[in-house]
Amino acid sequence: MQVFRMNRLTRLFCTPLLIAALSTPIFAQDVPQDQAQISLSFAPVVRQAAPAVVNIYATVVVEQKVNPFAGDPFFEQFFQGMGRSVPRVENALGSGVIVGQDGIVVSNYHVVGNATEIRVELSDRREFKAHVLLADKEADLAVLQLEGARDLPSLPLRNSDAVEVGELVLAIGNPFGVGQTVSSGIISGLGRSTLAIGAGHGYFIQTDAAINPGNSGGALVDVAGRLIGINTAILTRGGGSNGIGFAIPSNLVQNFIEQAVAGETRFQRPWAGVQGQAMDAAMAEAMGLPRPEGVVVAQLHPESPFRAAGLAVGDVILAIDGAPTDSPQEVMFRLAALGIGKEVSITYLHDGTRREAKTTLVAAPDSPARDPRTMGNDSVLRGLSVSRINPAVSAEMNLPDTASEGVVVTGADALAARVGLRPGDVLVAINGQKIVTPADVEAASTQLQRRWAVEVLRDGQPMMLRFRI
């Protein structure tokens, strides 16, 4: 089973036999005879919504290593990543949604996040250059500004928390580069949070409306023509739509747009300081609950606003501002959609008693001090930049939840890069000496030794880097 993000241009090949077959019109039903039958048509919704959905053509220049042993069945495996770098141009195709008459467009990060040139085509064939205002890999969202655009059609956003399973929806986008296409379906599920898409686990609306490559960044709209999600991914075995598509809910999109318009250069997420675990049947039975619900608080940071509101380890978070929270991803989604500075109510269980608390959402605190340092020529790890881990650093570098203290690599050049260190590595020990602060790195890396062993955590997994000088 694979999860596909849909941003590659795919060519369609039609055999003469298929073209001949399609040349004969096929009628699925009779012409509508009364007003009730006419009202079943989606045409009025499409006329309203389709002009606000655009095609996006992005150009990305990537550096590609040319392996001199490429194709050799024996030596290629030993020289991967070696060779000179050659720039290569990639073209990505996707969709976007106009959400502001002044040319504000929202799409997916994986469509435009690394683009060097972006061209946007409207349904009436007008074209605009565009630049990125705000992009976030983890959320897989990006907001663009069309240059010189004004008085454009736009889509209103609907509260995605009000969406229900079974509602009729339309998916509008540019699949396979054939041109703007509309497909219909229903909402198949809500709160899908077990999928790993992009840089992290998201929180999605599921639909059976056909979504294919090129639909990324397109609109999922209700029968009133309101945007309820940004089409992002499909779950498929063969690369085509199997009726299992996913969209980013409009509530998160709304906060993302607001931050982009306000001039933020990085998406600001509220910080909870909570590590949680989804409730299962065994845990519910052990806690005397009638059914599994909520998220069990496993750890609380000393500065957590949830701790300040009265929550403790072992409590169960049931809802935030009245919206259910049945997974850690759902908790994070609720907070990100609300935004920093909002006062929220928390419904939770404490010793089996239902309680309510209020707290104000805050940014991740930048304490203790980062104490950034770069190793000089007297260090065996020259070119290495490190910083002390705190909540703000963890958020900026997308560190695993388990990385709450210690020292993280923020940059690696010169010898530090050659021995295999990379940004995001959490330093554990150098030659057996435990690393707690950046000063420990300086002290340990200036010793006179020939054999070196550096212990790190990379993506939460322990690694040992050994080298000689």
Image: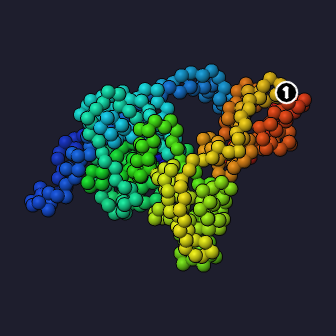
Quick check: 395 above or below 68? below
Q: In terms of depth relative to the viewer, which is nearer, 7 or 236?
A: 7
Q: Give the residue displayed 46% in from the left and 52% down from the top.
A: 337
Judge from the rendering whether residue 428 lies leftward or rightward of residue 113; answer left or right: right
Q: How is the image coloured?
A: rainbow
User: Which is nearer the eye, 65 or 58?
Assistant: 58
Q: Nearer the viewer, residue 105 or 244?
A: 105
Count of numbered marks:
1
Give the quadrant of the C terminus: top right
Can residue 397 be seen in this snapshot? yes
The image quadrant that residue 133 belongs to is top left
Q: Residue at x 49, y 32 (%)?
A: 114
Q: Where is residue 344 shown, x and y percent of the image? A: 50, 59
The image shows residue 299 at horizontal and vertical percentages of: 67, 60
Quadrant location of residue 437? top right
Please indicate, yes or no, whether residue 459 appears anywhere in the rendered image: no
Identify which amino acid the numbered label 1 is placed on. Ile
Q: Position of residue 231 (x, y in %)?
A: 39, 47
**Image position of 165 with respect to 406: above or below:** below
Residue drawn at (34%, 46%) of the image: 219
| Secondary structure beneath label 1 | loop
Nearer the observer, 449 or 241: 449
Position of residue 26 in the picture relative to residue 217 (left or right): left
The x and y percentages for residue 109 are 47, 39
Q: Crowding at label 1, few (<14), some or many (≥20) Cα neighbours within 10 Å? A: few
Residue shown at 37%/55% (left/top)? 159
Q: Is residue 420 left or right of residue 113?
A: right
Residue at the spot of label 1: 469
